[in-house]
Amino acid sequence: MNKELAEIIKIYATKSDRELNDYLLGKSKSNLIAVLTDLITMYINDKNSSTLREFLTVTISGYNHTEGKIGYNGYKQNVYGRPLMCEAKPKNIRSDGKRKLNGGGNFTDYTHERLKRDLKENLHMLVSGFVDGKLIYILEFPFNCEFFVSKLKRQLNRRFPDGDVTGQFLRSANFDYRDFVKCKDLRVVFCLPKTELEKYRNNIVKGFYEFLMGGCS
């Protein structure tokens, strides 16, 4: 974090709105641009919060973003009058790290009961990937896709073969691109042009990279 941004945050948290406004008005346009860019870079790469990446994933996909940790991440009206809910699973990796994008995501503290609720809601999944905060792709598919549901059920059945146990959870029900690429209603919402995508080849697992290259413009 640069010193200017640190000072602005300090004033925001400890001083009055007027003092903050006066301080900002005394800064040049280029200085404010630099501070804003630094703030966005820091926020979108934050390992402890996916709020900004979630917001982008949901809104670019045409949904209204819902804030808060409980419930689904977004909604939009569909032709049947009932809101269509969505669950966003954004993932960000660093270009200089070992992790690679694989179209994956996970559900924390999952249960058979929660799976039943999600199936009944008939929501849509929004899976997105970022590298150093740069959006690479957004894919959308119905949660009820049989291949996807099958992956979640297998993990739940291994953890709870006799059904849910009160107070216990499957800590992480995970999935990757192989669990939804065959879904008939899979939609590429956003994808970098192939010429741009090639720059991130080493940051994406081979099979998923080939899938994206086949679906991107």
Image (tube, rainbow, N blue to C red):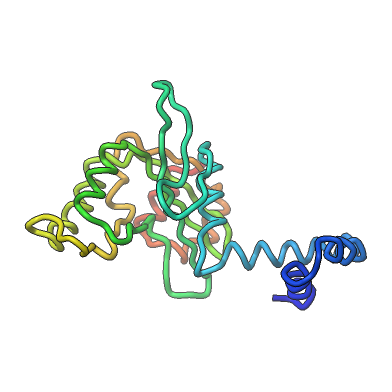
Closest to the observer, 206 or 119: 119
Please provide percent x and percent y for residue 104.
36, 57
Residue at 18% x, 60% y: name it.
166
Please provide percent x and percent y for residue 170.
23, 63
Left or right: 5, with 170 as reference point: right
Count all numbered tags in the image, as a single digit: 0
- Compared with residue 69, is residue 12 higher up or lower down, i.e. above or below? below
Which quadrant would residue 182 be assigned to in this image? top left
- Name the outermost residue toward the left: 162
Which quadrant would residue 101 be assigned to in this image? bottom left
Left or right: 204, with 142 as reference point: right
Residue at 78% x, 65% y: name it.
34
Residue at 34% x, 58% y: name it.
106
- Compared with residue 175, is residue 82 higher up or lower down, i.e. above or below? above
Residue at 45% x, 49% y: name it.
213
Please provide percent x and percent y for residue 207.
34, 56
